[in-house]
Amino acid sequence: MPDEIKPEAPKPEAAKPEAPKAEAPKAEAAVKPEAPKAEAAAPKPAAPPKAPPVAPAPWEGDLVTHMKNRFGAAILEASTFLGQNYFLVDATRIEEICFYLRDDQKFDMLADLTAVDYPKKEKRFEVVYQLYSFPRNERLRLKAPVAENESISTAVNVWKTANWLEREAYDMFGINFAGHPDLRRILLPEGWQGFPLRKDHHILTQDDQWVRENLNIESGQ
Amino acid sequence: MTEAETVYRPHPEDHTFLDSNEIVINMGPQHPSTHGVLRVVLRLDGEKIIGSECVIGYLHRGVEKIAENRTYVQFNPYVDRMDYAAAVSNSLGYCEAIEKIMSVVAPPRAQYVRVILTELNRIASHLLWLGTHALDIGALTPLFYCFREREEILKIFENYCGARLTTHSFRIGGLQYETYDGFEKQVNVFCDDFLHKVDEYETLLTGNRIWLQRTKGIGVISAEDCIQYGVTGPVLRGSGVKWDIRKAMPYCCYPDFEFDIPTGQNGDTFDRYIVRMEEMRQAVRIIKQAVAKIPDGPIMAKIPKVIKPPVGEIYHSIEAPKGELGYLVVSDNSTQPYRVRVRPPSFVNLSALDIMIRGHLVADVVAVIGTIDIVLGEVDR
Protein backbone atom coordinates (compact mmCIF):
# COMPACT_ATOMS: atom_id res chain seq x y z
CA MET A 1 0.00 0.00 0.00
CA PRO A 2 1.37 3.38 -0.85
CA ASP A 3 2.47 5.42 2.03
CA GLU A 4 2.37 9.08 2.64
CA ILE A 5 3.39 11.12 -0.35
CA LYS A 6 5.90 13.64 0.77
CA PRO A 7 4.71 17.17 0.17
CA GLU A 8 8.14 18.39 -0.85
CA ALA A 9 8.10 16.28 -3.97
CA PRO A 10 6.27 18.36 -6.56
CA LYS A 11 5.69 16.97 -9.97
CA PRO A 12 8.39 18.03 -12.37
CA GLU A 13 5.91 19.55 -14.71
CA ALA A 14 7.29 23.02 -15.10
CA ALA A 15 10.70 21.65 -15.82
CA LYS A 16 11.90 19.17 -18.33
CA PRO A 17 12.17 15.85 -16.55
CA GLU A 18 15.54 14.24 -16.35
CA ALA A 19 15.54 10.67 -15.27
CA PRO A 20 12.16 9.18 -14.44
CA LYS A 21 13.55 7.60 -11.33
CA ALA A 22 12.01 7.70 -7.90
CA GLU A 23 14.61 10.27 -6.91
CA ALA A 24 13.79 12.48 -9.85
CA PRO A 25 11.26 14.69 -8.06
CA LYS A 26 13.79 15.44 -5.33
CA ALA A 27 16.32 16.66 -7.80
CA GLU A 28 13.75 18.86 -9.38
CA ALA A 29 12.40 20.26 -6.17
CA ALA A 30 15.06 22.88 -6.57
CA VAL A 31 13.71 23.84 -9.94
CA LYS A 32 11.08 26.51 -9.81
CA PRO A 33 7.63 24.97 -9.27
CA GLU A 34 4.57 26.12 -11.14
CA ALA A 35 3.64 28.75 -8.61
CA PRO A 36 5.43 31.87 -9.71
CA LYS A 37 6.95 32.88 -6.41
CA ALA A 38 9.69 34.82 -8.09
CA GLU A 39 7.16 36.79 -10.01
CA ALA A 40 5.29 37.81 -6.90
CA ALA A 41 7.66 40.71 -6.48
CA ALA A 42 7.53 41.75 -10.10
CA PRO A 43 5.03 44.47 -10.85
CA LYS A 44 3.77 42.83 -14.00
CA PRO A 45 2.93 39.24 -14.76
CA ALA A 46 5.47 37.42 -16.81
CA ALA A 47 4.81 37.94 -20.46
CA PRO A 48 4.34 34.75 -22.45
CA PRO A 49 7.80 33.26 -22.69
CA LYS A 50 9.74 34.05 -25.80
CA ALA A 51 11.11 30.54 -25.76
CA PRO A 52 11.13 28.63 -29.03
CA PRO A 53 7.79 27.05 -29.87
CA VAL A 54 7.17 24.07 -27.67
CA ALA A 55 7.16 20.73 -29.36
CA PRO A 56 7.48 17.14 -28.23
CA ALA A 57 11.09 16.19 -27.61
CA PRO A 58 12.65 12.74 -27.36
CA TRP A 59 12.52 11.39 -23.87
CA GLU A 60 15.39 9.54 -22.34
CA GLY A 61 15.73 7.90 -18.99
CA ASP A 62 15.86 4.66 -17.10
CA LEU A 63 12.26 3.83 -17.78
CA VAL A 64 12.73 4.31 -21.51
CA THR A 65 15.80 2.07 -21.45
CA HIS A 66 13.98 -0.62 -19.52
CA MET A 67 11.00 -0.47 -21.82
CA LYS A 68 13.09 -0.54 -24.97
CA ASN A 69 15.19 -3.42 -23.71
CA ARG A 70 12.15 -5.41 -22.86
CA PHE A 71 9.74 -4.60 -25.64
CA GLY A 72 12.07 -3.48 -28.40
CA ALA A 73 10.22 -2.47 -31.51
CA ALA A 74 6.88 -2.39 -29.69
CA ILE A 75 7.91 0.98 -28.26
CA LEU A 76 7.30 3.17 -31.27
CA GLU A 77 8.16 6.47 -29.66
CA ALA A 78 9.18 7.88 -26.29
CA SER A 79 8.64 11.60 -26.02
CA THR A 80 8.15 14.37 -23.58
CA PHE A 81 6.01 17.44 -24.01
CA LEU A 82 5.84 20.26 -21.46
CA GLY A 83 7.24 17.94 -18.85
CA GLN A 84 4.78 15.14 -19.51
CA ASN A 85 6.20 11.86 -20.71
CA TYR A 86 4.52 9.44 -23.02
CA PHE A 87 5.12 6.27 -24.95
CA LEU A 88 3.61 5.42 -28.27
CA VAL A 89 3.32 1.66 -28.20
CA ASP A 90 2.27 -1.20 -30.40
CA ALA A 91 -1.38 -1.95 -29.63
CA THR A 92 -0.96 -5.69 -30.07
CA ARG A 93 1.29 -5.88 -27.01
CA ILE A 94 -0.60 -3.45 -24.84
CA GLU A 95 -1.67 -5.89 -22.16
CA GLU A 96 1.86 -7.18 -21.69
CA ILE A 97 3.17 -3.62 -21.46
CA CYS A 98 0.48 -2.68 -18.94
CA PHE A 99 1.29 -5.66 -16.74
CA TYR A 100 4.97 -4.80 -16.86
CA LEU A 101 4.36 -1.17 -15.98
CA ARG A 102 2.06 -2.10 -13.12
CA ASP A 103 4.12 -4.88 -11.57
CA ASP A 104 7.73 -3.99 -12.35
CA GLN A 105 7.56 -0.23 -12.66
CA LYS A 106 4.90 0.34 -9.98
CA PHE A 107 2.42 2.30 -12.05
CA ASP A 108 -0.35 1.03 -9.87
CA MET A 109 -3.24 3.26 -10.87
CA LEU A 110 -4.92 3.78 -14.20
CA ALA A 111 -6.18 7.31 -13.80
CA ASP A 112 -7.90 7.56 -17.14
CA LEU A 113 -8.42 5.73 -20.37
CA THR A 114 -9.80 7.39 -23.44
CA ALA A 115 -9.28 7.69 -27.16
CA VAL A 116 -8.64 10.34 -29.77
CA ASP A 117 -9.79 10.06 -33.35
CA TYR A 118 -7.41 11.04 -36.17
CA PRO A 119 -9.34 10.05 -39.33
CA LYS A 120 -6.44 10.92 -41.63
CA LYS A 121 -3.95 8.63 -39.97
CA GLU A 122 -3.47 5.10 -41.14
CA LYS A 123 -4.65 3.82 -37.77
CA ARG A 124 -7.32 6.31 -36.93
CA PHE A 125 -7.77 5.85 -33.19
CA GLU A 126 -5.28 6.42 -30.47
CA VAL A 127 -6.19 4.82 -27.18
CA VAL A 128 -4.72 6.93 -24.40
CA TYR A 129 -3.87 5.55 -20.97
CA GLN A 130 -3.03 7.89 -18.11
CA LEU A 131 -1.05 5.98 -15.55
CA TYR A 132 -0.06 7.10 -12.11
CA SER A 133 2.41 5.58 -9.71
CA PHE A 134 1.89 6.13 -6.00
CA PRO A 135 5.38 4.98 -4.96
CA ARG A 136 7.11 7.13 -7.60
CA ASN A 137 4.58 9.97 -7.57
CA GLU A 138 4.82 10.14 -11.30
CA ARG A 139 2.47 10.17 -14.23
CA LEU A 140 2.94 8.44 -17.54
CA ARG A 141 0.88 8.42 -20.70
CA LEU A 142 0.62 5.46 -23.02
CA LYS A 143 -0.79 5.83 -26.49
CA ALA A 144 -1.68 2.91 -28.70
CA PRO A 145 -2.82 3.43 -32.29
CA VAL A 146 -5.69 1.21 -33.42
CA ALA A 147 -7.29 1.02 -36.85
CA GLU A 148 -11.02 1.19 -37.29
CA ASN A 149 -11.57 -2.52 -37.82
CA GLU A 150 -8.91 -3.67 -35.39
CA SER A 151 -9.41 -4.49 -31.78
CA ILE A 152 -7.12 -3.87 -28.85
CA SER A 153 -6.87 -6.16 -25.87
CA THR A 154 -8.52 -5.00 -22.70
CA ALA A 155 -6.73 -3.66 -19.65
CA VAL A 156 -9.42 -4.88 -17.25
CA ASN A 157 -7.20 -7.68 -16.01
CA VAL A 158 -4.54 -5.15 -15.12
CA TRP A 159 -6.65 -2.36 -13.63
CA LYS A 160 -10.33 -2.75 -12.87
CA THR A 161 -10.87 0.93 -13.59
CA ALA A 162 -10.57 0.01 -17.24
CA ASN A 163 -13.94 -1.71 -17.16
CA TRP A 164 -16.10 1.39 -17.27
CA LEU A 165 -13.56 3.53 -19.07
CA GLU A 166 -13.23 1.04 -21.92
CA ARG A 167 -16.98 0.80 -22.13
CA GLU A 168 -17.08 4.55 -22.52
CA ALA A 169 -14.40 4.49 -25.21
CA TYR A 170 -16.37 1.81 -27.01
CA ASP A 171 -19.55 3.81 -26.63
CA MET A 172 -18.08 7.03 -27.97
CA PHE A 173 -15.65 5.71 -30.61
CA GLY A 174 -16.67 2.15 -31.37
CA ILE A 175 -13.29 0.74 -30.45
CA ASN A 176 -13.44 -2.95 -29.72
CA PHE A 177 -11.62 -4.04 -26.59
CA ALA A 178 -10.97 -7.76 -26.98
CA GLY A 179 -11.48 -9.76 -23.82
CA HIS A 180 -13.54 -7.12 -22.05
CA PRO A 181 -16.04 -8.91 -19.80
CA ASP A 182 -18.99 -6.66 -20.52
CA LEU A 183 -18.47 -4.47 -23.56
CA ARG A 184 -21.74 -2.59 -23.87
CA ARG A 185 -22.69 1.03 -24.27
CA ILE A 186 -22.55 2.90 -21.01
CA LEU A 187 -23.67 6.49 -21.52
CA LEU A 188 -25.82 6.13 -24.62
CA PRO A 189 -28.79 3.77 -24.63
CA GLU A 190 -28.37 0.24 -25.88
CA GLY A 191 -29.44 -0.05 -29.49
CA TRP A 192 -28.25 3.45 -30.36
CA GLN A 193 -26.51 3.69 -33.72
CA GLY A 194 -23.42 5.79 -34.26
CA PHE A 195 -20.32 6.73 -32.31
CA PRO A 196 -20.58 10.41 -31.42
CA LEU A 197 -16.98 11.29 -30.67
CA ARG A 198 -15.71 10.18 -34.06
CA LYS A 199 -14.68 13.12 -36.15
CA ASP A 200 -16.99 12.18 -39.02
CA HIS A 201 -19.97 12.25 -36.70
CA HIS A 202 -21.46 15.73 -36.91
CA ILE A 203 -22.50 17.34 -33.67
CA LEU A 204 -26.13 17.59 -34.79
CA THR A 205 -26.44 13.99 -35.95
CA GLN A 206 -28.46 11.65 -33.86
CA ASP A 207 -30.12 8.29 -34.18
CA ASP A 208 -33.53 9.52 -35.36
CA GLN A 209 -34.94 6.05 -35.62
CA TRP A 210 -34.12 5.28 -32.02
CA VAL A 211 -35.62 8.57 -30.91
CA ARG A 212 -38.82 7.93 -32.85
CA GLU A 213 -39.22 4.40 -31.57
CA ASN A 214 -38.35 5.00 -27.96
CA LEU A 215 -39.35 8.54 -27.20
CA ASN A 216 -42.34 8.87 -29.55
CA ILE A 217 -41.12 12.20 -30.85
CA GLU A 218 -39.96 13.12 -34.30
CA SER A 219 -36.59 14.50 -33.25
CA GLY A 220 -34.68 15.30 -30.15
CA GLN A 221 -33.41 18.58 -31.56
CA MET B 1 -14.77 -8.32 17.14
CA THR B 2 -17.22 -5.59 16.37
CA GLU B 3 -20.56 -6.20 14.83
CA ALA B 4 -19.39 -4.62 11.63
CA GLU B 5 -16.60 -7.09 11.09
CA THR B 6 -18.90 -10.07 11.29
CA VAL B 7 -21.11 -8.85 8.46
CA TYR B 8 -21.29 -11.62 5.93
CA ARG B 9 -20.04 -10.53 2.52
CA PRO B 10 -20.64 -13.22 -0.05
CA HIS B 11 -18.32 -13.66 -2.94
CA PRO B 12 -19.75 -12.62 -6.29
CA GLU B 13 -19.82 -16.22 -7.43
CA ASP B 14 -21.68 -17.34 -4.33
CA HIS B 15 -25.02 -18.95 -4.84
CA THR B 16 -28.04 -17.55 -3.12
CA PHE B 17 -29.29 -19.07 0.06
CA LEU B 18 -30.84 -22.39 -1.00
CA ASP B 19 -30.63 -21.05 -4.55
CA SER B 20 -34.19 -20.03 -4.15
CA ASN B 21 -35.19 -16.47 -3.69
CA GLU B 22 -33.11 -14.18 -5.83
CA ILE B 23 -34.95 -11.00 -6.66
CA VAL B 24 -33.96 -8.22 -9.01
CA ILE B 25 -35.12 -4.74 -8.18
CA ASN B 26 -34.64 -1.36 -9.73
CA MET B 27 -33.58 1.59 -7.72
CA GLY B 28 -34.03 4.82 -9.59
CA PRO B 29 -33.62 6.57 -11.94
CA GLN B 30 -36.18 8.68 -10.12
CA HIS B 31 -35.32 8.11 -6.52
CA PRO B 32 -34.49 10.85 -4.05
CA SER B 33 -31.49 9.06 -2.59
CA THR B 34 -29.70 8.53 -5.87
CA HIS B 35 -28.84 12.24 -6.01
CA GLY B 36 -29.94 12.66 -9.57
CA VAL B 37 -30.85 10.23 -12.27
CA LEU B 38 -28.88 7.14 -11.36
CA ARG B 39 -30.46 3.75 -11.82
CA VAL B 40 -29.08 0.83 -9.86
CA VAL B 41 -30.25 -2.67 -10.65
CA LEU B 42 -29.88 -4.75 -7.52
CA ARG B 43 -29.81 -8.52 -7.26
CA LEU B 44 -31.04 -9.53 -3.88
CA ASP B 45 -31.13 -12.62 -1.78
CA GLY B 46 -33.82 -11.69 0.68
CA GLU B 47 -32.69 -8.22 1.56
CA LYS B 48 -29.01 -8.93 1.09
CA ILE B 49 -27.31 -7.59 -2.02
CA ILE B 50 -25.49 -10.18 -4.07
CA GLY B 51 -24.84 -8.08 -7.14
CA SER B 52 -25.58 -4.76 -8.68
CA GLU B 53 -25.26 -2.84 -11.87
CA CYS B 54 -25.36 0.89 -12.46
CA VAL B 55 -27.26 2.24 -15.42
CA ILE B 56 -26.09 5.74 -16.19
CA GLY B 57 -26.23 8.20 -19.02
CA TYR B 58 -29.60 9.81 -18.36
CA LEU B 59 -27.91 13.20 -18.15
CA HIS B 60 -25.51 12.71 -21.02
CA ARG B 61 -25.13 15.93 -22.97
CA GLY B 62 -22.01 15.21 -24.97
CA VAL B 63 -19.84 17.81 -23.32
CA GLU B 64 -16.70 16.43 -24.95
CA LYS B 65 -18.28 16.71 -28.40
CA ILE B 66 -19.42 20.24 -27.66
CA ALA B 67 -15.84 21.12 -26.73
CA GLU B 68 -14.63 20.19 -30.20
CA ASN B 69 -17.16 22.55 -31.74
CA ARG B 70 -16.46 25.58 -29.56
CA THR B 71 -13.40 27.73 -29.14
CA TYR B 72 -11.26 27.36 -26.04
CA VAL B 73 -12.86 30.43 -24.50
CA GLN B 74 -16.40 29.48 -25.45
CA PHE B 75 -16.08 26.08 -23.85
CA ASN B 76 -15.12 27.54 -20.48
CA PRO B 77 -18.68 27.98 -19.15
CA TYR B 78 -19.65 24.45 -20.15
CA VAL B 79 -17.30 22.85 -17.65
CA ASP B 80 -19.28 24.40 -14.81
CA ARG B 81 -22.24 22.28 -15.82
CA MET B 82 -20.52 19.00 -15.14
CA ASP B 83 -20.00 18.94 -11.42
CA TYR B 84 -22.48 21.71 -10.74
CA ALA B 85 -21.96 21.37 -7.00
CA ALA B 86 -18.31 22.35 -7.46
CA ALA B 87 -18.32 24.51 -10.56
CA VAL B 88 -15.33 26.54 -9.46
CA SER B 89 -13.10 23.46 -9.28
CA ASN B 90 -14.09 22.45 -12.79
CA SER B 91 -13.28 25.88 -14.04
CA LEU B 92 -9.92 25.88 -12.28
CA GLY B 93 -8.94 22.57 -13.83
CA TYR B 94 -9.91 23.62 -17.32
CA CYS B 95 -8.27 27.05 -17.20
CA GLU B 96 -5.07 25.62 -15.76
CA ALA B 97 -4.94 22.91 -18.39
CA ILE B 98 -5.20 25.46 -21.20
CA GLU B 99 -2.71 27.76 -19.48
CA LYS B 100 -0.31 24.88 -19.18
CA ILE B 101 -0.42 23.96 -22.84
CA MET B 102 0.01 27.65 -23.71
CA SER B 103 2.88 27.97 -21.20
CA VAL B 104 1.14 30.86 -19.48
CA VAL B 105 1.05 31.33 -15.73
CA ALA B 106 -1.73 33.27 -14.05
CA PRO B 107 -0.53 36.22 -11.93
CA PRO B 108 -0.11 35.61 -8.19
CA ARG B 109 -3.14 37.62 -7.19
CA ALA B 110 -5.33 35.67 -9.56
CA GLN B 111 -3.95 32.44 -8.16
CA TYR B 112 -4.74 33.44 -4.60
CA VAL B 113 -8.28 34.44 -5.47
CA ARG B 114 -8.62 31.16 -7.31
CA VAL B 115 -7.54 29.22 -4.27
CA ILE B 116 -9.92 31.12 -2.00
CA LEU B 117 -12.89 30.54 -4.27
CA THR B 118 -11.99 26.93 -4.97
CA GLU B 119 -11.67 26.10 -1.31
CA LEU B 120 -14.92 27.89 -0.53
CA ASN B 121 -16.47 25.76 -3.21
CA ARG B 122 -14.97 22.66 -1.65
CA ILE B 123 -16.74 23.56 1.58
CA ALA B 124 -19.98 24.22 -0.28
CA SER B 125 -19.72 20.88 -2.06
CA HIS B 126 -19.01 19.01 1.16
CA LEU B 127 -21.90 20.79 2.86
CA LEU B 128 -24.24 19.70 0.12
CA TRP B 129 -22.89 16.19 0.50
CA LEU B 130 -23.26 16.20 4.29
CA GLY B 131 -26.78 17.55 4.29
CA THR B 132 -28.13 15.16 1.70
CA HIS B 133 -26.13 12.18 2.92
CA ALA B 134 -27.41 12.62 6.47
CA LEU B 135 -30.91 13.17 5.13
CA ASP B 136 -30.75 9.90 3.21
CA ILE B 137 -29.78 8.01 6.32
CA GLY B 138 -32.53 9.59 8.34
CA ALA B 139 -30.95 12.57 10.08
CA LEU B 140 -33.12 15.42 8.92
CA THR B 141 -31.69 18.26 10.94
CA PRO B 142 -28.16 18.67 9.49
CA LEU B 143 -29.61 19.49 6.08
CA PHE B 144 -30.98 22.80 7.30
CA TYR B 145 -27.80 23.76 9.09
CA CYS B 146 -25.66 22.80 6.11
CA PHE B 147 -27.72 24.81 3.69
CA ARG B 148 -27.61 27.78 6.04
CA GLU B 149 -23.82 27.89 5.80
CA ARG B 150 -23.76 26.98 2.13
CA GLU B 151 -25.94 29.99 1.51
CA GLU B 152 -23.22 32.23 2.95
CA ILE B 153 -20.72 30.80 0.48
CA LEU B 154 -23.10 31.22 -2.42
CA LYS B 155 -23.58 34.82 -1.38
CA ILE B 156 -19.84 35.37 -1.64
CA PHE B 157 -19.90 33.86 -5.14
CA GLU B 158 -22.86 36.01 -6.06
CA ASN B 159 -21.13 39.13 -4.83
CA TYR B 160 -18.01 38.18 -6.70
CA CYS B 161 -19.37 37.25 -10.10
CA GLY B 162 -23.13 37.50 -10.02
CA ALA B 163 -23.82 33.77 -10.21
CA ARG B 164 -24.34 31.38 -7.38
CA LEU B 165 -23.97 27.91 -8.80
CA THR B 166 -22.45 27.82 -12.25
CA THR B 167 -20.16 30.70 -11.61
CA HIS B 168 -17.84 30.78 -14.63
CA SER B 169 -15.49 32.48 -12.24
CA PHE B 170 -12.12 31.99 -13.92
CA ARG B 171 -10.79 32.85 -17.33
CA ILE B 172 -7.90 31.38 -19.23
CA GLY B 173 -4.95 33.41 -17.97
CA GLY B 174 -6.45 34.68 -14.75
CA LEU B 175 -9.68 36.26 -13.66
CA GLN B 176 -12.31 38.37 -15.31
CA TYR B 177 -13.25 40.34 -12.22
CA GLU B 178 -11.29 41.98 -9.46
CA THR B 179 -12.58 41.14 -6.00
CA TYR B 180 -15.26 43.43 -4.63
CA ASP B 181 -14.88 45.78 -1.68
CA GLY B 182 -15.13 43.86 1.54
CA PHE B 183 -14.39 40.51 -0.10
CA GLU B 184 -11.62 39.64 2.35
CA LYS B 185 -13.73 40.69 5.31
CA GLN B 186 -16.73 38.68 4.23
CA VAL B 187 -14.59 35.60 3.65
CA ASN B 188 -12.87 36.01 7.00
CA VAL B 189 -16.14 36.43 8.85
CA PHE B 190 -17.46 33.31 7.21
CA CYS B 191 -14.34 31.32 8.07
CA ASP B 192 -14.33 32.32 11.73
CA ASP B 193 -17.96 31.49 12.05
CA PHE B 194 -17.76 28.29 10.09
CA LEU B 195 -15.31 26.45 12.33
CA HIS B 196 -17.89 26.54 15.10
CA LYS B 197 -20.53 25.33 12.73
CA VAL B 198 -18.50 22.25 11.80
CA ASP B 199 -18.31 21.42 15.48
CA GLU B 200 -22.03 21.88 15.62
CA TYR B 201 -22.59 19.33 12.86
CA GLU B 202 -20.29 16.95 14.63
CA THR B 203 -22.27 17.21 17.87
CA LEU B 204 -25.33 16.23 15.88
CA LEU B 205 -23.77 13.25 14.16
CA THR B 206 -20.39 12.00 15.32
CA GLY B 207 -21.51 10.47 18.59
CA ASN B 208 -25.04 9.75 17.49
CA ARG B 209 -25.78 6.05 17.96
CA ILE B 210 -28.12 5.81 15.02
CA TRP B 211 -25.55 7.54 12.80
CA LEU B 212 -22.81 5.20 14.00
CA GLN B 213 -24.90 2.12 13.35
CA ARG B 214 -25.77 3.29 9.88
CA THR B 215 -22.23 4.22 8.89
CA LYS B 216 -19.68 2.10 10.77
CA GLY B 217 -18.60 -0.93 8.80
CA ILE B 218 -20.84 0.03 5.86
CA GLY B 219 -19.46 0.22 2.36
CA VAL B 220 -15.95 -0.84 3.32
CA ILE B 221 -13.35 -0.57 0.57
CA SER B 222 -9.69 -1.37 1.06
CA ALA B 223 -6.85 0.82 -0.15
CA GLU B 224 -5.84 -1.82 -2.68
CA ASP B 225 -9.33 -1.94 -4.11
CA CYS B 226 -9.45 1.83 -4.27
CA ILE B 227 -6.30 1.90 -6.37
CA GLN B 228 -7.45 -0.98 -8.57
CA TYR B 229 -10.68 0.85 -9.26
CA GLY B 230 -8.98 4.23 -9.63
CA VAL B 231 -10.98 5.66 -6.76
CA THR B 232 -9.63 9.01 -5.60
CA GLY B 233 -10.55 11.84 -3.31
CA PRO B 234 -12.06 11.46 0.16
CA VAL B 235 -12.98 7.83 -0.55
CA LEU B 236 -9.33 6.93 -1.13
CA ARG B 237 -8.25 8.93 1.92
CA GLY B 238 -10.94 7.29 4.02
CA SER B 239 -9.23 4.00 3.25
CA GLY B 240 -5.98 5.28 4.68
CA VAL B 241 -4.04 6.47 1.64
CA LYS B 242 -2.61 9.87 2.32
CA TRP B 243 -2.81 11.18 -1.20
CA ASP B 244 -4.04 14.55 -2.28
CA ILE B 245 -3.05 16.10 -5.59
CA ARG B 246 -2.70 19.48 -3.88
CA LYS B 247 0.27 17.98 -2.01
CA ALA B 248 1.47 15.22 -4.32
CA MET B 249 1.58 17.27 -7.52
CA PRO B 250 0.94 20.84 -6.47
CA TYR B 251 -0.79 23.20 -8.84
CA CYS B 252 -1.92 26.82 -8.61
CA CYS B 253 -0.34 28.32 -5.47
CA TYR B 254 -1.07 25.48 -3.05
CA PRO B 255 2.60 25.06 -2.07
CA ASP B 256 2.30 28.43 -0.30
CA PHE B 257 -0.13 27.09 2.27
CA GLU B 258 0.05 24.78 5.20
CA PHE B 259 -2.62 22.19 5.57
CA ASP B 260 -3.01 18.56 6.53
CA ILE B 261 -4.44 15.64 4.65
CA PRO B 262 -6.91 13.81 6.87
CA THR B 263 -7.14 10.05 6.47
CA GLY B 264 -9.24 7.26 7.89
CA GLN B 265 -8.31 3.70 8.76
CA ASN B 266 -11.23 1.42 8.06
CA GLY B 267 -12.40 2.71 4.70
CA ASP B 268 -16.03 2.67 5.81
CA THR B 269 -18.76 5.26 5.50
CA PHE B 270 -17.99 6.69 8.92
CA ASP B 271 -14.32 7.24 8.11
CA ARG B 272 -15.18 9.03 4.91
CA TYR B 273 -17.54 11.21 6.90
CA ILE B 274 -14.75 12.10 9.32
CA VAL B 275 -12.35 12.77 6.45
CA ARG B 276 -14.71 15.20 4.78
CA MET B 277 -15.49 16.99 8.03
CA GLU B 278 -11.78 17.50 8.59
CA GLU B 279 -11.30 18.58 4.99
CA MET B 280 -13.73 21.40 5.57
CA ARG B 281 -11.64 22.59 8.51
CA GLN B 282 -8.49 22.34 6.43
CA ALA B 283 -10.15 24.30 3.66
CA VAL B 284 -10.88 27.06 6.15
CA ARG B 285 -7.23 26.96 7.16
CA ILE B 286 -6.12 27.41 3.56
CA ILE B 287 -8.60 30.21 2.93
CA LYS B 288 -7.48 32.14 6.00
CA GLN B 289 -3.84 31.92 4.97
CA ALA B 290 -4.70 32.96 1.44
CA VAL B 291 -6.76 35.95 2.55
CA ALA B 292 -3.98 37.06 4.88
CA LYS B 293 -1.29 36.84 2.20
CA ILE B 294 -3.23 37.87 -0.87
CA PRO B 295 -0.84 39.95 -3.00
CA ASP B 296 -1.66 43.03 -5.03
CA GLY B 297 -1.13 43.12 -8.73
CA PRO B 298 -2.78 42.32 -12.00
CA ILE B 299 -5.36 39.57 -12.24
CA MET B 300 -4.85 38.63 -15.87
CA ALA B 301 -1.74 37.34 -17.57
CA LYS B 302 -0.87 38.50 -21.04
CA ILE B 303 -2.58 36.12 -23.34
CA PRO B 304 -3.28 36.49 -27.02
CA LYS B 305 -6.72 37.68 -28.10
CA VAL B 306 -7.22 34.51 -30.07
CA ILE B 307 -6.18 31.44 -28.17
CA LYS B 308 -4.33 28.95 -30.32
CA PRO B 309 -2.23 26.61 -28.20
CA PRO B 310 0.71 24.85 -29.84
CA VAL B 311 0.23 21.40 -31.31
CA GLY B 312 0.39 18.82 -28.58
CA GLU B 313 -1.51 17.34 -25.75
CA ILE B 314 -1.57 17.89 -22.06
CA TYR B 315 -3.12 16.15 -19.09
CA HIS B 316 -3.78 18.32 -16.10
CA SER B 317 -5.53 17.16 -13.00
CA ILE B 318 -6.61 18.85 -9.82
CA GLU B 319 -8.05 17.73 -6.53
CA ALA B 320 -11.73 18.45 -6.90
CA PRO B 321 -14.00 17.88 -3.89
CA LYS B 322 -14.91 14.47 -5.30
CA GLY B 323 -11.45 13.32 -6.33
CA GLU B 324 -9.07 13.63 -9.22
CA LEU B 325 -10.54 15.82 -11.92
CA GLY B 326 -8.38 15.61 -15.02
CA TYR B 327 -8.47 17.28 -18.40
CA LEU B 328 -6.75 15.84 -21.41
CA VAL B 329 -6.53 18.60 -23.98
CA VAL B 330 -5.34 17.85 -27.50
CA SER B 331 -4.53 20.90 -29.57
CA ASP B 332 -3.94 21.14 -33.31
CA ASN B 333 -3.02 24.83 -33.17
CA SER B 334 -6.48 25.96 -34.18
CA THR B 335 -8.95 28.03 -32.22
CA GLN B 336 -10.96 24.98 -31.24
CA PRO B 337 -9.69 22.09 -29.18
CA TYR B 338 -9.08 18.95 -31.20
CA ARG B 339 -10.25 16.92 -28.25
CA VAL B 340 -11.05 17.62 -24.63
CA ARG B 341 -11.36 14.62 -22.41
CA VAL B 342 -12.67 15.09 -18.90
CA ARG B 343 -11.60 12.53 -16.36
CA PRO B 344 -14.55 12.72 -14.00
CA PRO B 345 -13.97 11.64 -10.41
CA SER B 346 -17.62 10.73 -9.85
CA PHE B 347 -17.74 8.38 -12.84
CA VAL B 348 -14.68 6.43 -11.79
CA ASN B 349 -15.63 6.36 -8.12
CA LEU B 350 -19.11 5.16 -8.95
CA SER B 351 -17.67 2.13 -10.72
CA ALA B 352 -16.59 0.85 -7.30
CA LEU B 353 -20.14 0.99 -5.96
CA ASP B 354 -20.71 -2.66 -6.75
CA ILE B 355 -17.96 -4.02 -4.53
CA MET B 356 -18.86 -1.59 -1.77
CA ILE B 357 -22.47 -2.67 -1.40
CA ARG B 358 -22.15 -6.43 -1.77
CA GLY B 359 -23.41 -8.21 1.32
CA HIS B 360 -25.17 -5.18 2.67
CA LEU B 361 -28.87 -4.40 2.88
CA VAL B 362 -30.85 -2.28 0.47
CA ALA B 363 -31.03 0.54 2.98
CA ASP B 364 -27.23 0.63 3.02
CA VAL B 365 -27.09 1.26 -0.71
CA VAL B 366 -28.52 4.65 0.05
CA ALA B 367 -25.75 5.27 2.56
CA VAL B 368 -23.03 4.12 0.16
CA ILE B 369 -24.27 6.17 -2.79
CA GLY B 370 -24.28 9.14 -0.45
CA THR B 371 -20.80 8.47 0.82
CA ILE B 372 -19.22 8.17 -2.62
CA ASP B 373 -20.59 11.66 -3.25
CA ILE B 374 -21.51 11.55 -6.89
CA VAL B 375 -22.91 14.26 -9.08
CA LEU B 376 -24.67 12.79 -12.06
CA GLY B 377 -23.94 15.78 -14.21
CA GLU B 378 -20.33 14.77 -14.01
CA VAL B 379 -20.87 11.03 -14.30
CA ASP B 380 -22.81 11.42 -17.54
CA ARG B 381 -21.32 14.64 -18.93
Image (tube, rainbow, N blue to C red):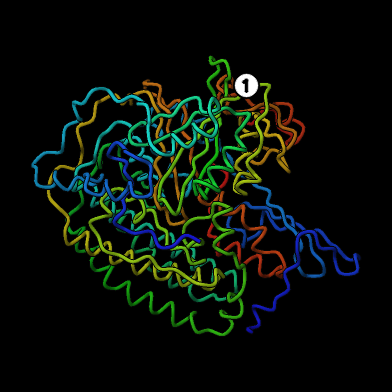
Of B129 and A96, nearer the camera is A96
Measured from the top left, where is residue A184 in percent x and y? 71, 39
Instruction: Determine whether the residue tagged by mark 1 lies in a helix, strand or loop.
Output: loop
**Disc 1: which chain?**
A
Q: Quadrant of residue A117?
A: top right
Q: Residue at x 53, y 84 (%)?
A: B208
Q: Residue at x 80, y 59 (%)?
A: B13
Of A89 and A43, nearer the camera is A89
Q: Circle 1 is placed at which residue position?
A: A147
Q: Residue at x 48, y 80 (%)?
A: B206
Q: Amino acid under label 1?
A: Ala
Instruction: Identify whether B232 is placed above or below A157.
Output: below
Q: Quadrant of residue A74?
A: top right
Q: Residue at x 23, y 41 (%)?
A: B106
Of B172 and A1, nearer the camera is A1
In the image, is B36 to the left or to the right of A5? right
Q: So how many labels did they put on this image?
A: 1
